[in-house]
Image (cartoon, rainbow, N blue to C red):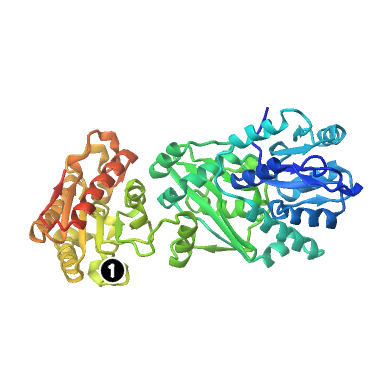
Amino acid sequence: MWTTPIKLIIWDLDDTLWRGTLADGDAVSLYAQRAEMVRAFNARGVVSSICSKNDLETARETLVGLGLWDEFVFPHIAFTPKPAAIEAIIEDMQLRPANVLFVDDNALNLAEVRHFLPEIQTLDITRADADDQLAGLLSLQAGTRSRVDDYRMLERKRRDRAAAGPLSNEDFLRSCGIRACAPHMMDNLDFADRIVELINRSNQLNYTGSRAAQGDLERDIIDLVGFDSWSIFAWDNYGRYGLVGFAMVDRATERLAHFTFSCRVMHMGLEEYALDKVREKWPAIDTSAWDGRFSRTAPDWIEDCSFHEPEVRAQLLAEQLPTAAPDPAIRIMFDCQSGGIAHFSRFRPAIEFDNHPRLFALRMMTDGSHETQHFPPLLVYGATVDYLDVRWPGQWHLIDIGLYETCVIRTCIFLLERGLRMLVVLPPEDAPEDKWRVGLNHTPERTRRFNALWRKAARENPGNIWVLDLAHLIERDDEMADVTHYHAGLLNKIAGQMDCWVEQVALGGTAEAEAA
């Protein structure tokens, strides 16, 4: 029966939510099952509103007495025509009529609303199977998060906007103190379930019309050679909106594979904010097909906040990953691959991981800049990233004639002094020719020499350094995009080996472990 997903149910009151007609002085009695339906829909992310021809104060007092008033958002209770009232509710909530269900006992009201809003879905509550239909609709809802507070926040903003008088929309937005943040690449793995929900629920502001399965989206986020991705978070003086947008560029086609937003942030300028992030890497990206669908004015009213700021990151992770430990015991230092390993680990809540520009680089051992970083007791280091010349600005010509070895020795000393333990992940030495990054001097010859230095360090420091040789894990050439970028399957294997190492170390193991 339901032609499109339902995001809002608009209820009549008299002989719909309760028995009797309030304006006639009836002692109304609640339909208890329907009241519980309202609460259950709210809990699963489908909000409820009211459109009823009644006196506002009398109806509000009655709903408060029944313990239901706080379950509704954007209620319209007045002796006015229902079609225009319902259209206003939908517009204020920034939804589409197709995603709204209107429930009433009056066939004329239902017909009139359908005539005025042809896409809206309706239910005649006098039908014998009406409650069964509502129960069936409830069973289809997979959401697990109430959105009542989100829309309550939007309600306050709408009220203040109306009271502000003849301000332009941009001037009002400037008064709201809007801040936004755009985590990039594998930082988005922690938010994959919410991103998928956003993509699959969004229609009005899903500009690419895309849909996604969680496993596929996670695979694409991990595939840094194939895709760039950004999630969008927003908050302002009214409260926190959470994750409200997502953009992903397909590198092969140089097109946006996903570009979608929550309708709750419509007209805030967040689409253009997101495009600014995309254009930093893809300045020629073509979005002309969406001209006129959202404002292209530069959103100077949005303050850009970096996900790499500790306070910002801690707040967002607390909201999205509530199980995360406040003081992680493990740090993965594998540059852009770090998040993928963390994602597959059984110990994810205890892990912090690197992602450019927050990262450890071996060159830091030359100037002591590593001293400013946080190093928990257990470290996992992807050595391959520092086999590239580009990781040694101004020093690349020295790394093959002693500088790299010096930094390895200094790392060993640092680990010993701090009592830290580190698993060093070594790249394969026999990778196919097309996997090497020869232009950056990541060659088989250099890899053999530098891998040997780490194996020597592990032998000489058995209580502080272990090595994991990827040559023992890789079964197929297509598990790597190149010697510094790995696909999901290989990252999963690395995570499994890391987890075994963590368990071994936690049990007090100190013998050399060259994992296989």
Quarter assignment of residue 107: top right
4 to 288, vertically: above or below: above
Quarter assignment of residue 381: bottom left
Where is residue 322 drawn, in percent x and y? 45, 56
Q: From this viewpoint, is residue 291 visible?
A: no
The residue that disc 1 covers is 370
Q: From this viewpoint, is residue 376 visible?
A: yes
Q: Quadrant of the C terminus?
A: top left
Q: Amino acid at mark 1?
A: His
> Residue at horizontal 71%, vertical 36%?
98
Q: Quadrant of the N terminus?
A: top right
> Residue at horizontal 48%, vertical 64%?
312
Where is residue 37 drawn, in percent x and y? 66, 42
Quarter assignment of residue 304: bottom right
Asked if residue 491 lies left or right of residue 76, the reply is left
> Residue at horizontal 63%, vertical 42%?
288
